[in-house]
Image (spheres, rainbow, N blue to C red):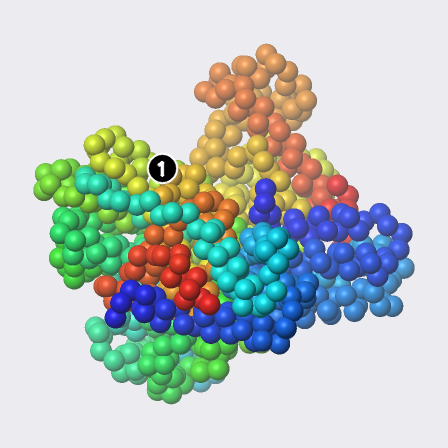
Amino acid sequence: MGFFDRLKQSLAKTRDSLAGKVESLLKFSTKIDEDTLEELEEILITADIGVDTTEKLISRLREKVKAEKIKSPEELKEALKNEIINVFPEPKFDIIPPAIILIVGVNGVGKTTTIGKLAYKFKSKGKKVILAAADTFRAAATEQLSIWGQRVGVDVIKHQEGSDPASVLFDAIQAGKARRADIIICDTAGRLHTKKNLMEELKKLYRVSEKEYPEARISSLLVLDATTGQNAIAQARIFKEAVNISGIILTKLDGTAKGGVAVAIASELNLPVLFVGVGEGVDDLQEFDPNAFVDAIF
Amino acid sequence: MAFEALTQKLEAVFKKLRGKGKLTEADVKQAMREVKLALLEADVNYKVVKDFIQRVTERAVGQEVMESLTPAQQVIKIVNDELTRLMGSKESRLNFSPSKVTVIMMVGLQGSGKTTTAGKLGLYLSKKGRRPLLVAADIYRPAAIKQLQVVGEKIGLPVFTMGEQNPVNISRAALEYASRHNNDVVIIDTAGRLHIDDELMQELINIKDAVNPDEILLVVDSMTGQDAVNVAEAFHNKLQLTGLILTKLDGDTRGGAALSIKAVTGCPIKFVGMGEKLTDLEPFYPERMASRILGMGDVLSLIEKATAAIDHNKARELEEKIRKEDFTLNDFLEQLKQVRKMGSLDQILNMIPGFSPQKLQGVEFNEKELVHIEAIINSMTKEERLNPSIINGSRRRRIAMGSGTSVQDVNRLLRQFEQTKKMMKQLSELEKGKKKGRFKLPFFNL
């Protein structure tokens, strides 16, 4: 199955609920009036796009309706689609070895699983990957990552539960240098962005990377659960401030969640979505393409 | 800040309403638009918001304006009543089996926090004198069984495992094991699954049929968006849930999911997860949550926490002092020590009326800072502690030197102390107001 089909399939639910409503709305209205726009607004909000971003999108759409003399509902739909696509910044994420990738996010979003999938992706491209089990807080997180390491066939650097995450990363960096790894992927403990001390701990991981491996390119990726509502924006903002997030991995898009908050994050923080998680299998991580994303929605 | 908490949004709305002699229909409409936007931003489900707004508007514009309240207070009261009603009007307890082993089944999406919550619930019940058995029935996620074992070890509870066998068999065997080993509660930790995964949903139905649980609890991430309703409805339709547990409520989520799920499924919220520690599980009190959303603070929870952690005599002394507003730096120090026993500062601050963390800008509450605070107060003379107003520039410098901090730190502490005093005053006024049976709102005295 091609990428497009997979994405489309996994977004089928989103499409049914969102586009279904758009279709039925547009079918009954032959001309565009304020009511039509207001109802579009509602549809976007129920997709978790959020009040602010929805209002921005709709007001731009309103201008377009005037400027381009949009008359038919089909044209309106195309225009809205384009508005959403335009919100996403160009994803800039290329791995130039040696690289360190910090995987961060709140609890339960799927960081460890995503790392397994990422490791598989990079390994399939012929890269040598080392995983750092720096989630030393959650019970059995290290074991979970180790199992993924075995599945994918990459080394995992680990310490005891409760040890300092920075020391795990330090060892992983030494191992990475010695074994000539291309990419070190660092798992981190889930933390709510409001916990100041835990965010400081995360900054320390970033500093350790800079200090111990100056030649390496360091990037931080934020893992977001697609079922999350507007709190995701606060998460993205604060993680971005802490460890300079370069992009988002949107997980659990195979449910009925709309993932619309990604549009809000792109709009407010100019953060691209890089990958989407669409299942529990090792190859269920897809590169994100805004065109396909929006096409699959409508 | 663009993303204010729901509480602050509503406060802002009602600030606009306040001071008007009478509420016109247009006023109510304006306020309701703001309430609607706030609720939507809080991730309350769209349909639930619509219903809510309609009900509140009807009541607000209608005849129900009491003489004792200003119209703005009246609107707040109605919004508060309706919020409380929406979340269930009274606290809901667990159902225990009267004769045999009580079976509790934990279900939910991936990553909602089932395993951690199973541990928390086990600890909670064992503190209440029960003898729970944790059952590892998540055979899919790597190391999930191990995770439950580690959790069980931490809290000193037995964990039943049978490797990666069929979860139905595991659950059945666990029940037998429990009756043989004198465990009176069995908590089954099932694997996370999507509500649209028919195969795995069937597995839950099979477990349910096999062990006939007294409680089927859906564990929901409180940060969930509009989809919360679909998830809860699907689980409810398949399993007839008996209740919900909201997790990760210690973050800054506005928690609209709580409102929507309750409204759509009718299932009561039985517990909330409030932190990373295994003791951070609390019963859910709907009226307290409504008050918290409205910025009236969670005074009841605060007092309850205080009585659980604080030495009773000291608590009585403190209460007396609060009442008399005779609160010194010595008490502040003592209180800080007690507070540390109650939990993290963020948790406690969230419960204080009209006192959202955002309001404390410039006042950093960091756990480590408590050590500095202690040092600073210890470096003061007795007189200074009793009467901080005498602390002038040179005293400040001396205190800073003595405690190894800076003058800025000393200033910040003194500011914090003043704020605490103010807050204490509010708290005691609120208490007094309650005694007189009046509906009094702290943010009207600001």
Q: Is residue B380 visible?
A: yes
**Is B62 placed above or below B427 here?**
below
Question: Residue B98: percent from the left, percent from the top?
Answer: 48, 83
Q: Quadrant of residue B291?
A: bottom right
Q: Which residue is mark 1?
A: A203
Residue A8 is left or right of residue B87, and the answer is: left
Q: Chain of mark 1?
A: A
Q: Quadrant of residue B153?
A: bottom left
Q: Residue at x 33, y 44 (%)?
A: A92
**Is B117 placed above or below B421 here?**
below
Question: Residue B97: percent from the left, percent from the top?
Answer: 46, 82
Q: Residue at x 27, y 32 (%)?
A: A210
Residue B240 is left or right of residue A137, and the answer is: right
Of residues B313 and B6, the one nearer the viewer is B6
Residue A149 is left or right of residue B49, and the answer is: left
Crowd band around label 1 with a 10 angstrom C-alpha radius: few (<14), some (14–19), many (20+): some
User: Which amino acid, mark 1?
Assistant: Lys
Extreme front residue here? A69
Question: Residue B396: percent from the left, percent from the top?
Answer: 57, 17
Element type at marker 1? Answer: helix
Q: Is residue B154 visible?
A: no
Q: Residue at x 32, y 65 (%)?
A: A4
